[in-house]
Image: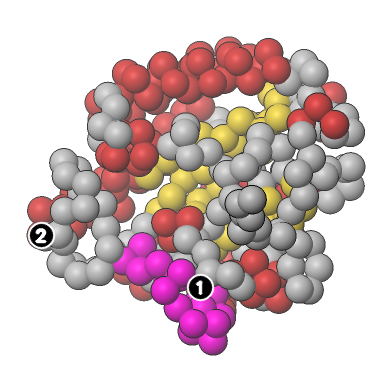
Amino acid sequence: MIELKAHDRYDYVPLVDRADYTWPDGKRLALCICNNIEIFSFCDGLGSDSATVGAPQTSRNFAWRDYGNRVGQWYLFDLMEDLGLPASHNFNSLLFDHCPQIAERILERGDEFVGHGRTNAERQDVFGEDEERRMIAEATEAIRRFAGTPPKGWLGPYLAQTDVTLDLLKEAGYDYVLDWPADDQPFWMKTRSGPIMSVPYSIELNDSPSMVFRQEGARNFEAMIVDQFDEMLLQSRKRPLVFTIVLHSFVIGQPYRLRAFRRAMEHVLKRRDDLWITTLGGVAEYCKGQPIP
């Protein structure tokens, strides 16, 4: 008999066996925009490429990614203003040193900072426990120093974790994580210091896997958003769900992609009155008082 390795971080509770609840004002579908703002090392470390998966780091693909911080993010801020949308920003802490105006705009908007490591030129699953603890502490303190409060949520660069990441995040004061895309509802995960919440974060409705790694077109991504939304709105009649759209400014911030995203959001927001439009932290805070598994 084959014995499967288990993580022992959460129990299997199928969707149909869970308690029902509603979002604020009786809403059944929560909408969260999850925006990744990242910084990379020039011709060094890790980083995406616009044309070839796994390409070496070059001045070309560094500049393509830097377009997001120089241009694409500002287009995206304007679009979110046009549509009246809040956002949660997964924020590399070295951006405070290199692109401080982005952080200032987030603070002005009243959006949420989510811990996202120091830089996406590295990933934490190669660290020992002490080194990982230091990295989490550095990223957390940078946000606390700028925003006045520490972040409550965490997404690791590349959604990478070690065997003790959840323990370290709980011990560092985090309330929720985004690294486990196992559900369309929040659920509790176990750590050595008590529970931490997993909040839905989409790998499917995510511009980077879709348009960079799977080479989907912008119109395909637009159709994905529309179909995902329409189906989840229908499914939410039976149970509360979280509809997340995940963005990267160097991907979605290209104008032709932004135009497709704008059309998709205009479709979604025709049902604005049926939605709880919030942040990831808003979902986590509300669910502390709900019977989530």
Residue 24 percent across, percent down from the top left: 82, 32
SS state under label 1: helix
Q: Residue furthest front?
A: 1
Q: Amino acid at mark 2?
A: Ser
Coloration of the structure image? secondary structure
- The residue that disc 1 covers is 139
Q: Residues within 10 Å of mark 1 (few under 14, many from 20)?
A: many
Give the answer, above or below, for where 176 lies relative to 217.
Answer: below
Which residue shows up at 56% across the image and 53% down it?
Answer: 179
User: Along the line of sight, which residue is nearer the eye, 79 or 278?
Assistant: 278
Residue 191 visible: yes
Q: Label 1 is placed on what type of residue?
A: Ala
251 sits to left or right of 140: left
Name the residue rendered at 37%, 24% in the picture: 221
Q: Nearer the viewer, residue 255 or 133?
A: 133
Q: Position of residue 240 (x, y in %)?
A: 77, 28
Q: Is residue 16 left or right of residue 110?
A: right
User: Which element is circle 2 on?
Assistant: helix
**CA–CA distance between discs 2 and 1?**
26 Å
x, y percent for residue 37: 40, 53
Q: Which residue is mark 2?
A: 59
Task: Classify residue 234 by image quadrant.
Answer: top right
| Residue range highlighted in magenta | 118-136
Residue 75, above or below 65: above
Q: Which mark is residue 167?
A: none
